[in-house]
């Protein structure tokens, strides 16, 4: 069906209300920007090149082009698009299937042009409501922007202070390093003197201990000789030795024979000097003195040869004590400086990490560093410590569960519109817990909501003045017609 369709049906009311608008005749459903593609003095060419036809076939309610471009104002093409001018509000493109379907999609009612439609032009009212809402948002944003400025000033100052502190700490480290070598040499010299003095005393002490040990062994040997020489003839015979079966060297038989005893003595019998010098060394580990009641000698032996346990080191002389105390002091001074140096290095590292943190283009987010914000839900208390961690704590008691550690800014478009916290406690049979924190402008720093859209993947909504930007509210709607 052919139809005269070049005149767009713009409501008279809108024309009157927005007298500053300029009216441009164009085919129904065509936007102002696309109007140049519809020239009534030429044949119409489909946008996708799928056909060419007399201009009269534009909006004739028959779909000629694959892309629907010949039917911008009817529902003839399944994939066409209808442009509502919506004068007084904002233009809108809708699928052309919605044209004349009895439902008002465009606020100016232009999509329902066929019948006497009941679509009223609500564009003006829509605009008024939206405008009021935008004004409220803009007012809140502008309050936030003022707070953000304060945050920013503090953030900039904090960064400068941190840099200055790092420079000062570096100076302190340099001073320590300048003294480090001399303290080290002093410590090493003092330690060498200490070792030399102690070594010299240890040599004397070791000799003394050896002597004591030898005397002890000789006394034990003499006692054993007395005990073994049961007939008191001044020598230990094989027979006498056999009274101590524990000395039997052969494991095969349980008899301690005369021959075996002689093998140990290397003679028929041995006298005291040879026994002490030679035999005792062979049997001392196995020899068991008979119970005290059996021999008098044994009693004497037990009394005379108590175990000797001398410590490894002697009691140091006062000279050595003095040298050791000097070494202790040199060590203490060196260690103290080393500890100071590593403490300073740790402080510098911490500060540098903070300096390198991205607190936004104006440093406003610095304000949130070191603070935590909580939200109580039915089951958990959720926690956000910006630039540090997120966590969840059951309200009925129990330990805090890590939902992630600071990862990175992750907003799409504006990267400061979201934060990512990663590598939290591993989820049973699932991923490590992680949190996305969406950041938006608000009068105060507040954790608004916390949810778990997918198991162990958490989503927080957080408002802060640090995210506020001035909103420009247009004072009048668009004037395209
Ligand atoms: C805990 C909480 C929940 C989480 C489950 C997963 O109960 O951390 O948020 O879904 O563990 O097992």
Image (spheres, rainbow, N blue to C red):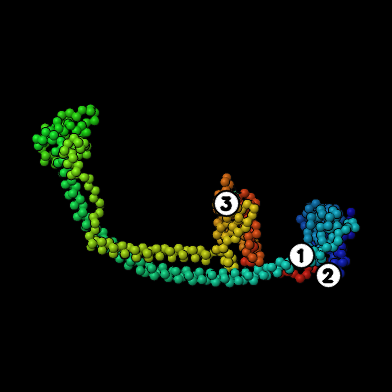
Camera-side residue: 69 or 347? 347
Q: Is mark 2 within 8 Å of ligand 1?
A: no
Question: Which sits earlier in the primary sequence, circle 3 or circle 2?
Answer: 2
Residue in view at x 18 percent, y 52 percent:
208
Regarding mark 1 in the picture, which secondary structure is present there?
A: helix
Nearer the camera: disc 3 or disc 2: 3
Q: Is residue 224 above or below residue 371?
A: above
The residue carrying mark 3 is 397
Regarding mark 2 in the picture, which secondary structure is present there?
A: loop
Residue in view at x 44 percent, y 69 percent:
169
Q: Is residue 250 above or below residue 397?
A: above
Residue 150 x/y as whole percent: 60, 71
| Quadrant into which the C terminus falls | bottom right
Outermost residue on the front side: it is 293
Q: For label 1, count other residues whose C-alpha is less than 10 Å away and answer few (under 14), some (14-19) or many (20+).
A: few
The residue carrying mark 2 is 18
Question: Which sits earlier in the primary sequence, circle 1 or circle 3?
Answer: 1
Camera-side residue: 422 or 195? 195
Nearer the camera: disc 1 or disc 3: 3
Q: Is mark 3 within 8 Å of ligand 1?
A: no
Image disc number at residue 130: 1
Q: For label 3, count other residues whose C-alpha is less than 10 Å away and answer few (under 14), some (14-19) or many (20+).
A: few
Question: Which sits earlier in the primary sequence, circle 1 or circle 2?
Answer: 2
């Amino acid at each position: 069906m052919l139809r005269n369709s070049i005149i767009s049906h713009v409501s008279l009311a809108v024309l009157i209300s927005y007298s500053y608008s300029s009216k441009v005749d164009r085919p129904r459903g065509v936007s102002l920007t696309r109007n140049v593609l519809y020239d009534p003095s030429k044949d119409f060419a489909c946008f996708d090149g799928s056909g060419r036809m007399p201009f009269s076939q534009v909006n004739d309610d028959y779909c000629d082009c694959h892309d629907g471009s010949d039917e911008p104002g009817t529902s003839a093409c399944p994939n066409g698009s209808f442009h509502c001018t919506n004068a007084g509000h904002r233009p809108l493109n809708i699928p052309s299937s919605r044209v004349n379907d009895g439902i008002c999609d465009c606020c100016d009612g232009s999509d329902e042009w066929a019948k006497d439609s009941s679509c009223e032009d609500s564009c003006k009212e829509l605009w008024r409501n939206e405008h009021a809402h935008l004004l409220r948002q803009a007012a809140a944003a502008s309050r936030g922007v003022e707070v953000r400025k304060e945050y920013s000033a503090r953030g900039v100052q904090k960064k400068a202070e941190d840099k200055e502190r790092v420079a000062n700490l570096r100076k302190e480290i340099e001073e320590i390093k300048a003294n480090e070598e001399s303290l080290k040499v002093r410590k090493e010299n003092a330690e060498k003197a200490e070792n030399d003095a102690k070594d010299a005393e240890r040599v004397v002490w070791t000799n003394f201990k050896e002597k004591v040990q030898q005397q002890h062994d000789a006394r034990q040997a003499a006692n054993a000789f007395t005990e073994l020489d049961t007939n008191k003839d001044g020598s230990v015979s094989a027979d006498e030795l056999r009274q101590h079966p524990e000395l039997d060297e052969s494991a095969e038989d349980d008899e301690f024979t005369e021959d075996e005893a002689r093998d140990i003595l290397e003679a028929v019998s041995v006298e005291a000097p040879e026994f002490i010098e030679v035999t005792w060394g062979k049997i001392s580990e196995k020899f068991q003195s008979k119970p005290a009641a059996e021999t008098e000698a044994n009693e004497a032996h037990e009394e005379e040869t108590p175990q000797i346990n001398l410590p490894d080191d002697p009691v140091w002389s006062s000279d050595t004590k003095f040298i050791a105390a000097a070494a202790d002091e040199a060590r203490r001074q060196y260690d103290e400086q080393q500890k100071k140096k590593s403490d300073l290095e740790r402080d510098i590292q911490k500060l540098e990490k903070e300096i390198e943190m991205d607190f936004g283009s104006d440093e406003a987010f610095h304000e949130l560093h070191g603070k935590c914000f909580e939200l109580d839900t039915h089951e958990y208390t959720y926690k956000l410590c910006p630039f540090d961690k997120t966590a969840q704590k059951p309200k009925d008691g129990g330990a805090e569960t890590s939902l992630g550690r600071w990862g990175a800014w992750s907003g799409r478009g504006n990267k400061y519109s979201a934060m990512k916290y990663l590598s939290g406690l591993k989820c049973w049979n699932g991923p490590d817990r992680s949190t996305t924190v969406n950041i938006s402008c608000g009068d105060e720093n507040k954790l608004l909501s916390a949810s778990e859209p997918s198991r162990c993947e958490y989503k927080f909504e957080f408002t802060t003045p640090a995210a506020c930007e001035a909103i420009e509210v247009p004072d009048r709607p668009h004037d395209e017609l």
